[in-house]
Structure formats: structure tokens, C-alpha cells
Image (cartoon, grey):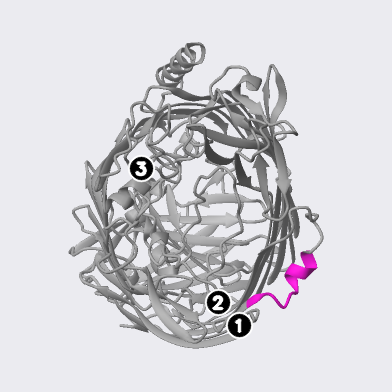
Amino acid sequence: MKRFLIPSIVLSLFLVFQLPAQNGKVESSIPKQVYFTQAILQKPPVIDGRFEEACWEQVKWASGFTQRIPYEKEAPTQETAFKILYDSKFLYVAFRCFDDEPEKIVRRMSRRDGFEGDWVEINIDSYNDKRSAFSYTASASGVKGDEFISNNGSDWDSDWNPIWFLKTQIDSLGWTAELKIPLSQIRYGQAEEHIWGLQINRRDFRKESMSHWQFFSQNDPNWVSNFGELRGIRNIQPQKQVELQPYVVTKTETFPREENNPFADGNDQSINVGLDGKLGITGDLTLDFTINPDFGQVEADPSALNLNGFRIFFPEQRPFFIENRNLFDFGISSAEAGGNFTSDNLFYSRRIGRAPHGDPSLNDNEYADIPDNTSILGAAKFSGKTKKGLGIGILESITAREFATIDNQGERRKEIVEPLSNYFAGRITQDLNEGNTVIGGILTSTVRDLKDTPLSSLHESAYSGGLDLIHWMKERTYLLTANVIFSQVKGSPEAILNTQTSFEHYFQRPDASYLEVDSNATALSGHGGTLKLSKYKGRWRFDGGFTWRSPGLELNDLGFMNNADEVNHFFWSGYQFNKPFSIFRNMRINYNHWLRWDFGGKNLYQAVNLNFHTQFTNFWGVGTGVTYELKDISNNALFGGPALRQSPGVAHWIYAYTDSRKAVRFNLNYSNAWGFEKDAPRTVYNNNVSLSINYQPTNAVSFSLRPSYSINQRKIQNVSSVDFRDKTRYITGAVDQRTLSSTFRINVNLTPNLTIQYYGQPFFSRGTYDRFKYITNSLAESFQDRFTSYTQEQISFEAASNTYQVDENLDGDTDYSFDQPDFNFRQFRSNLVLRWEYVPGSELFLVWSQNNTGQAGPQEDLFPGLSDRWFSEKNHNIFLLKATYRFLK
């Protein structure tokens, strides 16, 4: 351990203190651009992209753009000019995007926020906090894009969808865009004269260049704090936004009929209504609410299957929860930390409205109708930021008590499968020192009404909270980040015992002497946090620190946590070449290392990584990387058993892609990994290849296909555990898993506001096990010393019960048995969505969703059956019509 630990920490310190000294020169400050606007004195403009109204003559065209990508400080590849006006209700923006060859302007279309082809955008920091901004993007094709920018440009939330108006035109000089933005869609405080941060960005698609009104270097990742200024806005009152959006949904489902099952008669119909709303409490604080929401238009999650037991993180896709989600983000570690914990967060909105926890026990001849998801009775968000830099985010949601209806030959009863629950998340931040220092905190709670329910295995309450600090130094070159968190869950002894012995905790591990299972406990508490120092400006950058999760930390009631009982050290450093040279357009070289311990002091993991990425001047690109794992001990691999030493090894990946501007584009990814030991070659073998093919025959139509195939082979994979002669046998086997999947998409834009999208994913994964064994010395240095293999005389397969029978002592009697672990999972999911925004903010959806999930025989081949899954009468089909109308005041 010391052979790796000491050099890695020494290298980290060298890079932190020496490289910044060698490359620590901060670029001289760049003069701030200032644009002066005026209030409209005459009739406001008609939004048509022509600028023919007299009011546009009140202000002059502003230009002075500078190229940033790829050639810094050089003249832009195409000139850009803009004007800004305002009145008491709206902000008006005119863009003149010059082009030497107007006939070659790229007018690719997409759904909203696709950002295809040529575009121009305005970023407005109306808080003037130098951390957040509102972005409005106009593509040459007339497609809108809008994003809420936070964390000084680190996060761009494209799910923020305000109401605004846009028209574009192409003429002999290039193309134009005219925007009308309601001031109610821009949050700001009371002031006699407003000073807002301002940035204008232009993309020249053919040259793949970016030019900006306010220039700053590519070596400076700070975004909002580098804006110029918008001045001249006087005597406007903060707009108290009022929006109401009722909806109606009709739905028809078809599914396979099941003989004797009264709930599976082959079809079902329903109608639903609800209301979404947005109320401006003040000009900078807004209340969003939803009553009986419906998310039927949301795309299904991609298929996934893993054998390691770790939770699979699926991103939020429901509109109410994704808008302004950054306000509630409280991640515990950075992406550079790597590992299984980078998704850990105190707030994970997909816990709200999840599938019910309960699963009723059924007798013979009984059938159950169980809701797919828990109904959300209502939810509200209160969010915004005051002019003094106080950021506020409060979310409250109530989900219904859900029942399963159980039928026994016509007699029916109901059983509770999900309790009435309340979810709360509150987040505050305070900007100090002109945004160079930010302190904040978060508190979350989950409270369930478990009275008179059979759900005593659930937590009655769960609380988590945290404090965080970010502090920029030396003109926002260095960043110190720190946070500390806590959690406490309460419930019955059964609920707390389940938590202590769950995958994330495993207090029962026989070699974890520092842990103890308390079967009488009614509460469990834990803590965690992160401390790191980063350098984000300049060619040399780094990010390094420590993050920890105590054994009792539990976040999965309203947050997301993959594992507890870990202390992780991570370090990343990279050098980047942003200016083209020779055949290269840009290049990045990175170094990483990781170390991990548990709270018993055991060193679990050691790894180093090098990776390289470049784009050539022909716009093709390649990247590759290699990770060398020196040590890998898992506390989870035996699912409650002792820590298992896993084989060290090498993982390698490589990718290549073609010019993204072309009508036909390819992206090839290949990765492989080997685990090896002196007495056992290739104990682990992983191989994955995927190919992404994109074809855009016209500006309005695009196709994409992404097939992938993977092999996962491991000589020690957990199978089961049984008791034998006062000992626990941790049974493992050699697994060979093959997975084939493909994602297919079609996008058709009939107009910028009328689109058709299709998404389909067939997914097949088959795993077969052999060479069964039981663990005898899980931490042995020699691979062969960690287990004892069953002989042919000791183990046999019984087809009638689909189990393996073990006669370990060879006395002729079965000592124990375990289920056959082979699997052959097959699934097909698809969505076809027609979306029409018939007036700004009001939409009509026509949706057809398909789902077909099942198991095939373990010995069946992986490939046949594709067409059976795609065009099968066993498909579960959902046909949905959803109409919304947004009332805006």
C-alpha cells in the first residue's frame, strides 16, 4: 500500500503547489464591454425578423465580437451585431448575423433546446450575482433554445422553458433573429436603474467557431463572472409572474390477456385532469405548483442490468421536477472523483412518485392489481434569489396512499402497498464578496404515515441535511470546496435492521469488527462530506481532495447513495491545448489517481489513470485512456459476506468520431478490461463495443442508431449464501454475461413548433454460470487460495426444481441447495411522440408507448427473438392524448 500511497500523495502535492507556480500567471484583466439600451418611445416592434419599425432607430448596432474558439483573440469568422430595447413588459433583441455565403447557412431543425446548425444567443445575469444567468438561443431555422445557467457556467439547465417569442429571416446579408422576452421570465429585484450582466454568443456552424461580444480566454472556465454589462434599464417594476396551465389526458392501454386474471382483460381506458401553475410572489421569488400531475409524454428509461448490486442512477425526466433542479442540487463529490459515488446527492426527485414499496403475498387462485407508480397528489416549489444574494429553494410534495386490489375468484380485498408520504427539501445559499464566496445549507425530510399498514419495513421518517462552502481565490483561479452532511432514519426495529443489513451498509459482515448489528435499534445516523481544492483557470488544471461516507449514512429515502462506509481520496490534473497547432484543433492530456479505505482502516482500492483526447483540424477526433488497478477489495461483492480481494488489472478504452457537421456522422467506442493474477490468468474479462450512426438527410429529418455489444466474464461472481455446520457458505461461480442492445431514434421537424420523435430500444442480456465454488479465505493473496471448488461428485443439477443440489461431505444426502442463477433477460421499449406547441407555452401531445419485458430460457441464443419482441401481441401498448393550455398574465 505504502508503495503507491506515498508517491501518489507526493505527486498530488507537487502538482498542486509547483505547476500553478510554473503556470500561475493570471491573464491581464480584459476591459468590460458595456451596452446602453433605451426604453421604447414609440410603438413596440412587430416580431418578424425584419427590424422595420422606427423604434429600432433609437439605438445603434453594437458589434466588436472576438473569436474564442478555435483561434483566441482573432477576428470572428462572421461578423455579428445586435440591438436591445425594452418597455414596461418586454425586452426586445435584434440580431444581425452577417454571412458571406447566405445560401450555405445551416438551418438544421430539432426540438426545442436542440442547438443545431447556426445560432446566436443572449445571456442575461439579471441578478448581477456573477454566478447565474438566463440564456435565450435563436437558431437560424427558428428553433428556440433556453437554459438557466448556474454555478458560474458549470451547469446549464436546458429543461427551463420560459415563454418568449422568436422570428428569423435569411436575406442577402446573412440572417436575422428578432426576440421578444417577457420581463416576467427574467427575475430581478427593485432598482431605479438596473445593471445586468450581458453576453452575446454566435456559432458559425460551417467553421465550427464561436465568437463573443465580451471576450475571455478558453483557459478561463468562469462564465457568468466574465460577462459585460447591460445598462440603461430604468423604472421597470419587477413582474409578478402568473401562469396557469391546466391539462387533460386521455389514455388507452392494451396488454396481453391472462386466463382467469380479472385484471388482465387486454385493455384499459382512463381520463385524467390536473393543473400546473407559476405565481410570482415578488419579482425575484416564484411559487411553482402542480396538482395531480401526469408525465405520460416522458420517454421511458433505457434498459439496464448489472450483477454487482449497486443502484442504477436514472436521470429525472419529469418536467415539474427538472425545471430549476439545480436549486436543490447538493452533490457530495465531484465528477473527477470517479468511482461509484459521483451521483450521490441529498436530493433525488425520482424518489417522489416511485413504484410502491409493498408487494402483497398471494395465495393460489389470487391475482393482484398493483399501481405502477405512486400518485403525486400535489407538489410545490418556492424558489428564487434576492438582490442581496440570498438564494432560496423549497420543495414540498405529498404522495397518496396506494392500494393493491386482490381478487380471489370474484371476492376482492385491498391491501396497502404504499403509505401516505410527505417529502420536503429546503436549500438556501448566500453570496458574499461579489460571489467569490458562497455559503449554503440544505435540509430534506421524508415522513410516512405507517399507522395501520403492513409496511413496518419502511422508515417512518428520514432526515438529511448539510452545509457547504465554495470560495474562489486569485481572480477565480483556485476554488476551495467543502461540505458536510448528516442523516438520520427512524422506524421499527425491522426497518432499521433492514437498513443495517442492506447492500449499502452490510453491518453483518463477519470481518467488520468495527460494526455491530443492533436488532433492537429504532434509529440510525450517519455523516459524510467532501473537502477539495481545484484550479480551473489556465492550461494546467487540477482537482483533488477527500470524500467520506460513514457506515450509518443513509440517503436513499429522498436522496441517492450508492455505498456507505468509505473514505475516498481522488486527484485529477490535466493540461490542455486550446489553440490549433499542426494537425490538431485542440488536445487534452489528463492524469488521475484514486484511493479508498473503509472506516475500519482497511485500504480497499488503488488505481491510476492516464487519458488523452484530441480533435483534428478536419474536425475528426479520437481519445484513449488506460487505468491500472493495483488493488481492489470489495466489501459488497459477497452481499453481506466478508471483504473479497478482487483481481488487479488493466482497463483500456478508445473512441473515434467523424466530423459532426456532416450529414452522416459516426462515433465508435471500444473498451476492455482484464483482471489477472500470478496463479490465474484472466480472472476478469470485460469487452464492450458500441457504434453511433447519425444521418441527417434534410434540415428537418434526422436518424440515429446506436448498437452495442458487451461481454462480462468473471471467475468469482456471487451466487448465494447458505448455512452448513454452523458456518456460512458464500457460494460463487464463474459468470459469462453477453448483452446486446440498440437505441434507434427518428426526429422529424415539420415546423419549429411541431415535431415527431421516435425512440426504440431492444435489449437482450444472457448470463450463464458454471465452476461453482465457496469462499474459504476471501483476502488470500493467491487467487486459488480464496475458495474451494465443488467436485462433480459434490454438486448436481435437479431440473424439476431448477436448483443445484450439494452433497459437500459426500455422505449421499443433500447438505444444501441453491437456485440456478442463469438468466436470459429480454426487453423492448419504445416511444412515439408528436408534440405541437400551438401557442407559446401551450402544447398538444400524441404518444404511443410500447413495453415488452420477459425471460427466455437460459440456454436460448442471445440473438434470435428480436422480431418477436418488436412485433409481438405480448406488447404492453399505451396510447395517450395530452392537451395543455397556458394562461399568462
Q: Earlier in the sequence, mark 2 or mark 3?
A: 2
Residue 571: percent from left, percent from top? 46, 27
Q: Secondary structure at mark 2?
A: loop
Badge 3 density bin: few <14, some 14–19, many ≥20, Cα 10 Å: many
On the image, numbered disc 2 is attached to which residue?
A: 365
What residue is drawn where x is 46% and y is 78%? Answer: 406
If you read the primary sequence from the N terminus, does the residue marked by circle 1 or circle 2 appear first? 1
Q: Amino acid at mark 3?
A: Gln
Instruction: Single out the mark in the foreground, 1 or 2.
Output: 2
Q: Which residue is mark 1?
A: 260
Q: Is residue 362 left or right of residue 109?
A: left
| Front position among marks 3 and 1 | 1
Q: Position of residue 458 (x, y in %)?
A: 34, 57
Out of 547 and 286, give the one closest to the viewer: 547
Q: Nearer the viewer, mark 2 or mark 3?
A: 2
Q: Amino acid at mark 1?
A: Asn
Is 446 left, or right, of 731 in this rendering?
left
Q: Residues within 10 Å of mark 1 (few under 14, many from 20)?
A: few
CA distance separating discs 2 and 3: 36 Å
Q: Which residues are magenta?
A: 866-876
**Rendered location of residue 149, percent (x, y):** 40, 55
Q: Which mark is residue 500?
A: 3
Instruction: Determine whether the residue tagged by mark 3 lies in a helix, strand or loop.
Output: helix
Image point (26%, 44%), residue name:
520
Disc nearer the start of the sequence (3/1): 1
Image x and y of residue 587, in percent: 62, 34
Q: Is residue 769 visible?
A: no
Local packing at callout 2 (Cα closer than 10 Å; few below 14, some 14-19, many 20+) is few
Name the quarter where the C terminus is drawn.
Answer: bottom left
Find out whether residue 309 is within the magenta segment: no
Can residue 337 be seen in this snapshot? Answer: yes
Which of the 4 quarters of the picture holds residue 869? bottom right
